[in-house]
Image: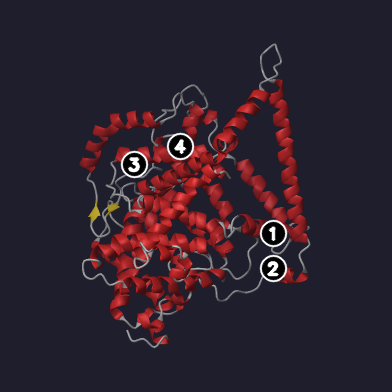
């Protein structure tokens, strides 16, 4: 990498380190001798990786500066509270790291988390009539809550309006969840301080879980905006990494490819030749990777083979309130729910039933055939697990992921300005922007096959003569659903006070913004977009609409948080908060 290309990364690293020194180490800030001391010698380690510590300390510094110093600095300039906070954070993160090392990340990421998302999608589509049912269209939240219940979100809101009882249940659930985690992770001397315990509980339960996740992160438009920002940032980074050298090489290759022509029709002859060579090269690489991986998996020693034998796991609990099944054996890799989730999102059962049938038949023969190469501990099963461990669960990917999340939440190491809830047509624009970002990420060769082809851009009457309205909503487009796209103002909460628009206000807003909506949607569209691309964008929007209802998103997010917490702290499932505190000889 050239010096010019590495310069922005060094500047970002220096700015982050300067922020940490200024906020968390104010006694050394400005001292030239202390500024040369590495951060790992000034601050307690948060994990076993310095790169991970840098990202975690950057988040801690932003939170301390914007949420603690804003009121604590007015009381006293003493830094004891900051030092104690850092010590508590370091103790909790090191304890969590040890628990993560004992966690089955493969099962959690590929089976349990996708299983909860599957439950959300199934309940959502049934609630809005996607599954062929005939629900009450005025209260889809009630049907969704009956299909995917959660104690914190009971009773379901009527006509998009949350009840006081539901808000109180949600607040009590967050308090109980955080108190159980702190009763296990906090040091004993800190648990003995009731003021500190209550302060930390309120900050995490109300500020992070309540205001951050329950009121903001669960909003559908914010989910779409987050998807758009993450994908757009990755695309910009990819373009930056390619650089001018990549552009020059592509120009040279293009000139070489177009240097010969067939004469009669002017088509380059060498283009097809180079494409054939490229496909042959990719085929050789794929075959080599597959053969080496299978050979490595087959040559495992006997001791490693014994680890793959299904063993009863009585210590693995199921999360409270969720429908994740209790697993008593090591699941085969091919039976993980992530494959069913991808099929459910793409709706392959409806679009390509022949493909789902073929894949199910292949999996059946791999799992229960003569050789059973896909069963637990077999060659193919080992190969898939080793590939996942080496390519996905690489330690160097965690700092990059934390940095991306930090940049999205705290751009330029600062909390972004407060966002107002966008109007209905603005939320649809955000969804279209996310759909464009998703479509630009998918290779055209895959999107043309797994998204709607050109023939689906016409009506289903089979004539193929009447094109679909290019800017129709997801509820009346190629998805064929009568109400897949939930109303934008179905449920908007601020954490304590519910907000619901009346029917008259909704109709008036729709009349006033319909013309501006069409203009804005055309403005963000690619010029001269062909019908196939427009149908693909509408198709992606129908998938994004699955996460457009805030109340339903809360079910999924709270279930995911509960699942992760129970896996990391399984003690809270079988014991109450009082029992956990009594075990550590602490009076409630």
Q: Name the residue under label 2.
A: 308
Question: Could you tell whether 26 is left or right of 323 in the image?
Answer: left
Image height of 198 relative to 544, above or below = below
Q: Mark 3 points at which residue?
A: 427
Q: Picture coordinates of residue 578 (x, y %)?
A: 37, 82
Residue at the spot x=33%, y=87% of the render?
587
Question: Could you tell whether 193 is left or right of 443 in the image?
Answer: left
Q: In the image, which disc is placed on residue 381?
A: 1
The answer to which of 234 and 373 lies nearer the viewer is 234
Per the model, the C-alpha gap separating discs 1 and 3 is 43 Å
User: Label 1: how many residues lie within 10 Å, few (<14), some (14-19) or many (20+)?
Assistant: many
Counting residues from the start of the chain, the first of labels 3 and 2 encountered is 2
Counting residues from the start of the chain, the first of labels 1 and 3 encountered is 1
Q: In the image, which disc is placed on residue 436?
A: 4
Per the model, the C-alpha gap separating discs 2 and 4 is 43 Å
Residue at the spot x=48%, y=72% of the render?
94
Q: Residue furthest bottom?
A: 585
* Any part of residue 479 in sight: no
Q: Looking at the image, do the residues carrying marks 4 and 1 touch, with CB atoms under 8 Å apart?
A: no
User: Label 2: how many residues lie within 10 Å, few (<14), some (14-19) or many (20+)?
Assistant: some
Per the model, the C-alpha gap separating discs 1 and 2 is 10 Å
Q: Which residue lies furthest to the front in this view?
A: 33
Q: Which of marks 2 and 4 is in front?
A: 4
Tell me the element at label 1: helix
User: Label 4: how many residues lie within 10 Å, few (<14), some (14-19) or many (20+)?
Assistant: many
* Any part of residue 525 in sight: yes
Q: Picture coordinates of residue 117 (x, y %)?
A: 48, 55
Image height of 360 relative to 96, above or below = above
Q: Nearer the viewer, mark 4 or mark 1?
A: 4
Q: Looking at the image, do the residues carrying marks 1 and 2 touch, with CB atoms under 8 Å apart?
A: yes
Question: Could you tell whether 452 is left or right of 56 in the image?
Answer: right
Counting residues from the start of the chain, the first of labels 1 and 2 encountered is 2
């Amino acid at each position: 990498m050239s010096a010019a290309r590495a310069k922005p990364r060094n500047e970002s690293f220096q700015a982050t380190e300067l922020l940490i020194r200024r906020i968390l180490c104010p006694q050394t800030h400005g001292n030239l001798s202390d500024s040369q001391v590495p951060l790992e010698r000034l601050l307690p380690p948060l994990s076993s990786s310095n790169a991970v510590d840098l990202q975690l300390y950057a988040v801690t510094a932003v939170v301390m500066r914007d949420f603690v110093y804003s009121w604590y600095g007015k009381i006293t300039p003493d830094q004891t509270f900051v030092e104690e906070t850092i010590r508590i954070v370091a103790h909790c993160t090191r304890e969590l790291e040890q628990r993560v090392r004992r966690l089955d990340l493969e099962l959690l990421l590929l089976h349990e988390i996708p299983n909860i998302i599957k439950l959300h999608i199934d309940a959502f589509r049934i609630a809005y009539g996607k599954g062929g049912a005939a629900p009450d269209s005025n209260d889809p939240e009630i049907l969704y809550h009956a299909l995917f219940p959660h104690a914190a979100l009971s009773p379901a809101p009527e006509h998009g309006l949350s009840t006081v009882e539901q808000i109180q249940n949600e607040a009590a659930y967050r308090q109980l969840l955080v108190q159980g985690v702190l009763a296990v992770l906090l040091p004993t001397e800190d648990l003995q301080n009731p003021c500190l315990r209550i302060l930390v509980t309120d900050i995490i339960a109300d500020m992070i879980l309540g205001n951050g996740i329950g009121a903001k992160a669960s909003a559908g438009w914010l989910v779409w905006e987050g998807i758009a920002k993450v994908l757009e940032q990755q695309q910009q980074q990819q373009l930056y990494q390619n650089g001018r050298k990549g552009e020059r090489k592509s120009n040279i290759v293009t000139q070489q490819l177009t240097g010969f022509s067939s004469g009669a029709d002017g088509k380059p002859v060498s283009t097809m030749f180079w494409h054939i060579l490229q496909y042959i090269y990719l085929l050789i690489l794929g075959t080599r990777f597959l053969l080496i991986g299978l050979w490595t998996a087959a040559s495992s020693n006997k001791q490693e083979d014994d680890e793959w034998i299904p063993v009863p796991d009585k210590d693995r609990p199921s999360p409270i309130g969720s429908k994740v099944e209790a697993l008593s054996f090591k699941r085969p890799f091919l039976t993980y729910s992530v494959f069913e989730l991808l099929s459910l999102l793409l709706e392959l059962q409806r679009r390509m039933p022949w493909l789902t049938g073929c894949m199910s038949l292949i999996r059946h023969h791999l799992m229960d055939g003569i050789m059973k190469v896909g069963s637990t501990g077999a060659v193919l099963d080992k190969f898939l697990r080793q590939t996942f461990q080496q390519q996905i669960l690489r330690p160097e990917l965690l700092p990059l992921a934390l940095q991306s999340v930090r940049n999205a939440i705290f751009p330029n190491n600062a909390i972004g300005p407060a966002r107002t809830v966008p109007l209905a047509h603005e939320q649809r624009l955000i969804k279209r922007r996310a759909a464009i970002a998703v479509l630009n990420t998918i290779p055209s060769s895959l999107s043309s096959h797994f998204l709607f082809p050109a023939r689906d851009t016409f009506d289903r009457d089979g004539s193929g003569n009447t094109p679909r309205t290019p800017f129709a909503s997801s509820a009346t487009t190629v998805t064929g659903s009568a109400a897949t796209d939930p109303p934008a103002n179905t449920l908007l909460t601020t954490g304590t006070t519910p907000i619901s628009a009346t029917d008259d206000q909704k109709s008036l807003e729709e009349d006033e913004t319909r013309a501006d909506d069409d203009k804005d949607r055309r403005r963000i569209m690619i010029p001269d977009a062909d019908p196939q691309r427009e149908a693909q964008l509408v198709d992606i929007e129908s998938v994004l609409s699955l996460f457009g209802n805030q109340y339903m998103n809360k079910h999924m997010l709270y279930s995911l948080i509960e699942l992760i917490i129970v896996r990391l702290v399984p003690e809270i499932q079988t014991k109450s908060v009082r029992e956990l505190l009594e075990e550590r000889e602490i009076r409630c």
